[in-house]
Image (tube, rainbow, N blue to C red):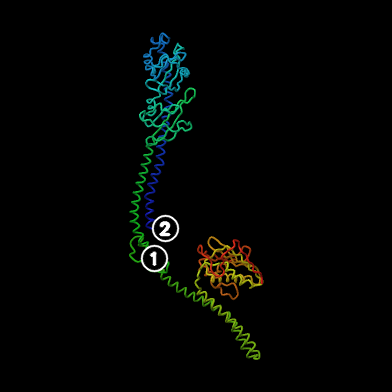
Amino acid sequence: MRLGLRARITALLLLLSVAPPCAVVWIIRGRVLPLVRAEDEGRIADALSEFEAAIAREGNDAAGALEIVALLLKTDPRFRAAGGRDAPFPADATTSLMADAGLDCLSILDARGTVLASGHAPSTAGRTEPRLLDLPDARSTFVEETITPGIGRVLTLQSRRPASGRPEIHLVGGRFLDADFLRRLSPGGTVRTLLLDDGGAILAASDPANPPPVPAGWKDPRAGGGRLDIRGVPYSYRMIPLRDHLGRPIGSLVAAVSLARAAELSTSLGAIAIGVVVAGLLGSLLLGFVLARGVTGPLRRLEEMSRRIASDRYEPVTGPEGPGEIGALVAAFNHMARGLADSRERLRQTERLAAAEEVARRVAHEIKNPLSPIALTLEGLVRTKQVRPQEFDAAFEAAARTIQEEIQRIRGILEDFSRFGRLPVPRPRPADLNGVIGQVVTLYAGSSAETRIVADLDAAMPPVSIDPDRISEVINNLLGNALQALRGKGGTITVTTRGTADGAEVLVGDTGPGLPDQVLRRLFEPYLSTTQGGTGLGMAIARRIVLDHGGRIEAGNRPGGGAEIRVLLPWAAPGARADGPAAREDRPAAREETTWPRS
């Protein structure tokens, strides 16, 4: 659909007012959102790094605290004799010892793994825990504890060491990895963390009252992270597996950060972009209407006058010319229209005179040729009458025949000129082009004993929109010219038809000498003749007939020698049937080639 000038001006203003702000918003969004997302991912990475650093710190602190406990056991009189069957470790004193050392859990075991005392789980006293003896000496590791009554299941970071001077006594203690520990990983609370056991159950959360859900891929060690939704808010999470001192999976740490800030920023930028677009639309529509109203009115009048000029009407633009550049343009157009009207009138008169002079010159030239034999014949009759009267009757009969032939020739010349000036309008209709060509070729088949005519006609040719009488005249003219080119030399004339996407193509070629370049350039101009006695109107008439059919005609030379004329004619409407005597209802799929032998 072609837009008018007003619509194009408005569209241009819309583009200029909307595109730059939208591009700025798009650039800002493309630059800022990745930074925000990178910052969120950085907070997760910082939390995970802090977890690893905190584990290292807590492990070192726990190992140092166990050294203090070992020293106290050696120096404190309450514990120096304890450890035997008759002198157990006092439970209250063990809890106090654990608190003084800054530990969250402390167990005292004998060499068999029997718990002699426990500061964090007094009820375990007397229970055998050989797994605690397998803990590495002076190096912390993850240990899952179940403390009842009270805390329940909790993940701890514990280490083991023997008591100073008492190798049969083992100290196992450390820190809880609980909610307080997880909250210390992200002081601002922007990162939410979870501790999961090996079965995916939550052991601790930085926000116990509102823990994030367990990610769906928590068990896949290759997952590493992803996205999850917490009450409609998108979160990005990362996950690291936890293993004990033997390399066995013991749980996972999940750190999640909210993407709400990036989503809100994206929404805000989108709203800004929509607001800019709406404001730009309204402003551009208003400004475009005001500007276009002052521009398109005069231009529409100019457009109307351009159409009039194209129709040979040269009246100037009516109405006020107006100020500014548009007014100057209208004034210049009016001046041009008046000048064109005057020039057109002078040109018409000049063309009429030139055409009349050319016709008169050509007619005089063509008639002068047959008049000379007539004059010479009459002069011969006069001399015969005066000098040899007895031969006058015989000479008169010969002279009469000569004069009649030349008069017939003059009549033919006048008819050609008259016919060129009043060619009938063609009446195209669906017709069988091959049948029309075949009839003309049949007429020429016996016209020359030295020339062979070959027709290579496309038998699958659909109906073509032509006036059979007029196209027959074109083919007749082309074959006649080809025969003239081969007269006295002999050769072959080939007539070919084939279907193309643009229409039906007719090729008429010969094996003669071809056409010189100067003739090719002017072949279809009137009065150009390459044969003795020709009027030079045949190819001009053929071209006019083809153009009246909406087709094209071209001339050229074959690469192997000889001239070739190409005619392209339009197809008939789909579904149309050819009429006329040459129409055929069933057409073979193959091409048909007919050779008219020399006669």
Q: Name the side, left or right, on which 262 lies relative to 532.
A: left
Amino acid type indicated by mark 1? Met
Q: Position of residue 107 (x, y in %)?
A: 42, 16
Q: Nearer the viewer, residue 293 or 388?
A: 293
- Residue occupied by mark 1: 305
- Quadrant containing the C terminus in the rendered view: bottom right
Residue drawn 33% across the image and 64% down it: 320
19 to 515, vertically: above or below: above
Q: Name the side, left or right, on which 241 lies relative to 596.
A: left
Question: Hey, which quadrant is residue 163 in on the image?
Answer: top left
- Quadrant containing the N terminus in the rendered view: bottom left
Q: CA distance from mark 2 to mark 1?
A: 20 Å
Using the rendered image of the protein, determine whether residue 20 is visible from the camera's viewpoint.
yes
Residue 2 is labelled as 2
Residue extending furthest toward the front: 585
Amino acid type indicated by mark 2? Arg
Q: Secondary structure at mark 2?
A: loop
Q: Secondary structure at mark 1?
A: helix
381 to 214, vertically: above or below: below
Q: Name the side, left or right, on which 442 lies relative to 301.
A: right
